[in-house]
Image (cartoon, grey):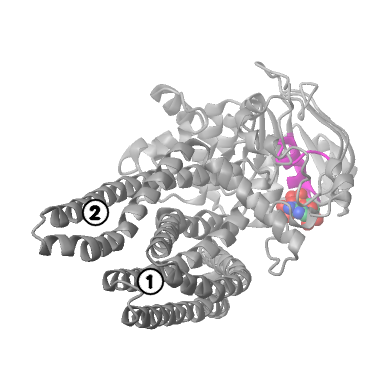
Amino acid sequence: MTSGTNHVQPGATAASQERAGHEAARGSSAPDEGRASTDAFAHLRGTAGEEQVDLNREERKFIRRRSWRLLARTSRGVRLKLLLTALAVVLAQACQAATPVVVALAIDWGLPRVVDGEASGLWIPGALYIGCAVTAGIMIFFYTRMTAEASQQMLFTLRDEVFRKTQELSLDFHEEYTSGKVISRQTSDLESLRELLDGGINSLVQGLMFMLFTTLSIWLMDWRSGLVLLAAAVPILLLGRWYQKNSEVAYRRTRISSARMIVHFVETMTGIRAVQAFRREHARDRQYRKLAKIYRDDMVRSIGLFGILQPSLVLVGNLSVTAVLLWGGFRVLDGDLGVGVLVAVVLATKRVFQPLDMIAMFYNSLQSAVAALEKVSGLLEEKPKVTEAPNPVRMPECRGEIEFREAEFRYQAGGPLVMKKLDLHIPAGQTVAVVGRTGAGKTTLAKLLARFYDVTSGTVTLDRVDLRELAAEDHHRHVAMVTQEAFLFSGTIRENIALGRPDASEQEIVAAAKAVGVHEFILALPEGYDTDVNKRGGRLSAGQRQLISFARAFLADPAVLILDEATSSLDLPSEALVQEGLERLLGNRTALIIAHRLSTVAIADRVLVIDAGEVVEDGAPEELIAAGGYFSKLHAAWSSTMSG
Ligand SMILES: Nc1ncnc2c1ncn2[C@@H]1O[C@H](COP(=O)(O)OP(=O)(O)OP(=O)(O)O)[C@@H](O)[C@H]1O
């Protein structure tokens, strides 16, 4: 793959700037270490505390504040819409709650007039009723639309932010966090939020408003019945509090178990070849069932809480209606209360509890969404370790001279030194083969040059400019890394080659393919350069993919090429093909090749033998063979396999 060296878009750090002063969550970069130790919430920053279920008061407050900040930021562009929606909801609910009052008016004020032959007793309540109904209808239409627009806009912003953030984060984050978790944040967590934003908030506000106005109308009609409602509010609030406390933990648990399940699923699917090759299907399935069962049980537990809440609320509602009816009925018998008012008050009391069901339901989705928001806001709080300097050095032209000076590197703070005080100068245009035992640090050297990571101490320079000072865009243009996997994106062969330089003309794309010797092969494909790499017939072998990625790199025309070579998986004819392509690709660029084959070393000007993070042999291939060290043994072994 011609990999984009990890760089940060200049505009993509607005969110991180807002969080200036916060420590990096996982605290492995040197400047953060000191501050993290004085930070009481260091263990919760970013994705660090993601799996923690039980939080204390302060921790809950910290997480909630972060979620709210994210919601506030996401709603920035739609606040007017939200305000208008709220107004429309209030108006609609006021109109709906007013209808029982109109019924009372019709019975107690209108009917006597109608009996006396006065038409006003009929049309005034009638007009009021129609007025309320029509206004409520218009307002409902209005806010339904507005809510959909506002919530979809917020989700769009969130989706985009999650995507940009995950792309922006450095490789170290992805190696730890895994793509399964990112997928879980982007899919199941955002889905929970969608459920809430799409209908939940609306119904919640709508229900609350309806209850408020209906309660007001009851107080206006008969304050004694209002007292019954006040008494009913006590058990309702207690129930609400109980539910909130318990469901918060329960839903947090479901977000964690759902993420674990998705991670396992994604890992199995991405590693399906290994799973099938090693007959791991049953074991993976067993593990998946275990995780899915945990998720199921967590869900059942949280829904079970709702199962207690809902009938309890219905019971309180029904008892209240009975109390209002009995107390009001006795007062009607005593002549203290009009029948119309009693009918209206009983009607209103019955209605006042109706939205409770709905509110409880959406409180449920609110809790689920809050748990999801905690996770998403944590992910968005992460900061890339590899960042662009505030005033980066531009480099329009590059010769390709590389220097590592006293470069040291460890993957994690406190972890082992993977590279020890490396001093290495590679003049422009040199082809350097890097060899060494597995785990010696060859790929690490390449990753540092591609700036997937920054050195822990010392420097790495390109044309004497420290990579940390160099503009990401220029670094990306001058240094390209072609990895073993030779990843092809969905799309045509042409598009895949053009990734190296999106503005390349057709001739340039064909010229690149010809240069690395893959043109004839592409023409033989069912649709030539238009062949879709994911469709039947477009499926390429490892060697063919490698050649396409060579063409991609050739087109990008970088001054420095880093190659993590494809290895023994290639058969000999295609290996020869790759070899020819490779030679033409190298041209007179500076190249760092992690060599796994004798043929590659043969074209190198220089060989570096790395062992335990140190260069132990360095010289022209023939010199090293003559010296009789590690390389000469390796060379002898390679030669014997070639001749055998
Ligand atoms: N992301 C990582 N986090 C922690 N340690 C790592 C990470 N990647 C590599 N290492 C460690 O760094 C050391 C060097 O690894 P590296 O991948 O550079 O070796 P290599 O020489 O390229 O090996 P190979 O030939 O097997 O690819 C190894 O001990 C490895 O365990």
For image coordinates 38% across by 83% down, the residue present is 326
Q: In the image shown, does 440 or 330 lie closer to the viewer? A: 330
- Is 621 located above or below residue 502 in the figure? below
| Residue that mark 2 sits on | 133
**Image location (x, y in percent) of residue 277:** 54, 70
Q: Amino acid at mark 2?
A: Ala
**Which disc number belongs to residue 35?**
none
Q: Residues within 10 Å of mark 2 (few under 14, many from 20)?
A: some
Q: In the image shown, does 132 or 486 lie closer to the viewer? A: 132
Question: Which residue is most to the left?
Answer: 117
- Magenta stretch bounds: 432-455
**Image location (x, y in percent) of residue 593:** 70, 39
Determine if the magenta segment contains residue 438.
yes
Say whether mark 2 is within 8 Å of ligand 1.
no
**Image location (x, y in percent) of residue 227:** 49, 71
Left-right relation of 108 to 248: left
| Residue that mark 1 sits on | 349
Left-right relation of 11 to 42: left
Q: In the image shown, does 81 or 338 lie closer to the viewer? A: 338
Q: Amino acid at mark 1?
A: Thr
Give the label, 1 or 2, closer to the camera.
Answer: 1
Question: Which quadrant of the figure contains the N terminus?
Answer: top right
How many numbered marks are there?
2
Q: Earlier in the sequence, mark 1 or mark 2?
A: 2
**Image location (x, y in percent) of residue 495:** 42, 35
Q: Is residue 119 visible?
A: yes
